Image: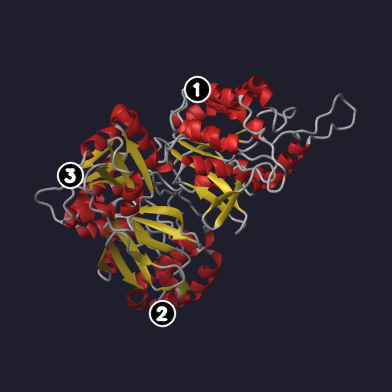
Amino acid sequence: MGSEEWRSSNPTPIPSSREVAPGVGHAFVRGARSVISSRIRPEVASDCRVGAQMFEDNARRRRPLDGLVAALSSTPLFARLDRPQLEHLASAIRPLTVRAGECIVNEGETGDTFYVLCSGLLEVVAGPASERVRLLRAVVPFGELALLGSRTRTATIRALRDSEVWCLSREAFDALLASEGDFARTMVHALTQLVLESRTQHAPRGLPSVIAIVALHPNAPTRAVVDAFAATLAPATVHALHPPDDATPSGWAHTVEAAERDHDVVLLVASHHRDEWFAFCMREADRTVAVAQRAASIEPLDPTSRPDLVLFGGGGRAVAPILALVKPRAHHLVSPHDQTAALRRAVRRITNRSMGIVLSGGGARGLAHIGVLQALTDAGITIDRFGGVSMGALIGALSARETSPEQIARHLRRELVDRRPFSDYAIPRIALIRARRARAMLERLLGPARIEDLAHDFFCVSADLVSADTVVHRSGSLVTAVGASMSLPGLAPPLRDGPRILVDGGVLDNLPVETMLQAEAGPLIAVDVLARGVPGARRRNRGSEAQLPSLLETVARSTTLASRQRAEAQRTLATHAIVPDLRDIGLLDFAQFDTIVDAGRRAAQSVIVEARALLHP
């Protein structure tokens, strides 16, 4: 279900033959607070682990008091209390209803309350980036260290679903310590146990398990999207929930919780009516998928919702105005001629199961990307997302247009070897070539296409000479974006784009793995064609001096020197890295077309088995 279950062994009993008077026990607890604070990290006490799973399936079927008592007994702090003591403790607890998106505790605030999650789902996030460190499912206690002293919360806990929580204040807890001798004595043993035992559990960021499928207009094809989830995610179980006729919002939350226990993915399906069910779906979901026809009149969502947009229909209405209206986190185009494949691709991306590939720059060496793509395709590995720089941007763009590796090879052999687009030399006032032939090549290969209209997700990067920043191209003219990414400084003139002056992205980031990782859409492969050898500095034979590169080779190589170290770091971020052996290939050796493509095909063999296992476990 994309979340971690909480388990640990039961505390070891600590025998004692002494009776502890109420006042003594109360004093001990006060003294022990400082020990606990110094010996145990707050998140350890929020571990919420002992016995929680055993109550998960049946606590809801018990009376509320029984469920609360069971949860309290699963907490290390209260595990040694007997039934009457637990019931007495439960009587001091008050209920709290929390809506999805609301915070129960906030990082940095002073804590004075202990909680038990009765129903729903919470996440614990910490740090400047609000990184998720765990998920909490009912029935689970947390925050018991707040009862032992005023401490600053080191994490934020917020509701991912509408949740019911029980709360115990430190004031009520202190009153129990002062009045109940047996309770105080038992707390002495529990505190001692907590001092002796300390352990931490971490939960990885899970896949979305509750997804809202919402229509943006009447008759939007939500049913097709629901069916695609079931077909694509099989053998995982997918359960769709439609608006119940007789349930209340609190009842809906319990229905979702039960469905989430029994299924891998729960889909909350809502029509275009902005009713209470629609609001509930938007609030409860880990991720929202908005569904629309390209030609329909669309009613936008709240601009903060950032849904995935599944857009049906072929050409006609431009995509860019729709994206400006909906403001999606990602969009997925579904054309009539490949609806099944497009929907499966969308589902893979939405559920973080899609394979991406990042293709580095490297001049003629970049032709190795063709061989890599051929090998992956032959192995049955589907690439859903493409990113690239320079020559990698061109090959990535062609792939995102659903051009096969074999077709790419034919097109680029004709353009790069036969037509020689980088040979229109000029008097070097701005650059060594005019780049008119290169621009004509891009217009022949890419036409008037826009990035946002591509079947596959695509981006490329360039560098802005004015701001010294990396520019990520995710929309606009494909020719302009790829042309900017390929404008090698000194070789080709920079490209003007409003106030920006753009050159080859390899100057700043020749392997933009981190840029693709920001989408969190699944594993990715990085292909670095500049990692091995020194292009253009070849030796005639072993022991001889290095052969000096040509002027063009020197210019081309110099522009990527600054980003070489960054590329090495970026490779480590990828799920898989492919580094073809191209040490004898210069950046302008397009005549060695077949040799370069074959090197890419051979290098790809090193990751095929592992990549296939990732996509088809």
Residue 407 — which label? 1
Residue 235: image location, x then y, percent: 33, 29
Residue 465 — which label? none
Mark 1 Cα-neighbour bin, 10 Å: few <14, some 14–19, many ≥20: some
Disc 3, SS: loop
Residue placed under numbered mark 2 in the picture: 23
Q: Is residue 161 above or below residue 334?
A: below
Residue 434: image location, x then y, percent: 64, 40
Residue placed under numbered mark 3 in the picture: 242
Q: Amino acid at mark 1?
A: Gln
- 144 with respect to 65 (left or right): right
Q: Amino acid at mark 2?
A: Gly
- 580 with respect to 194 (left or right): right
Upstream in sequence: badge 1 or badge 2: 2
Toward the viewer: 243 or 555?
A: 555
Residue at image position (50%, 31%) is: 444
Residue at image position (31%, 33%) is: 335
Disc 1, SS: helix
| Spatial CA span between label 3 and label 2 | 57 Å
- 25 with respect to 427 (left or right): left
Q: Amino acid at mark 3?
A: His
Task: Tell which tag, 1 or 3, sits nearer the viewer.
Answer: 1
Toward the viewer: 299 or 70?
A: 299
| Spatial CA span between label 1 and label 3 | 45 Å
Upstream in sequence: badge 3 or badge 2: 2
Instruction: Indicate the quadrant containing the N terminus: top left, top right, bottom left or bottom right.
Output: top left
One can see residue 63 in this view = yes
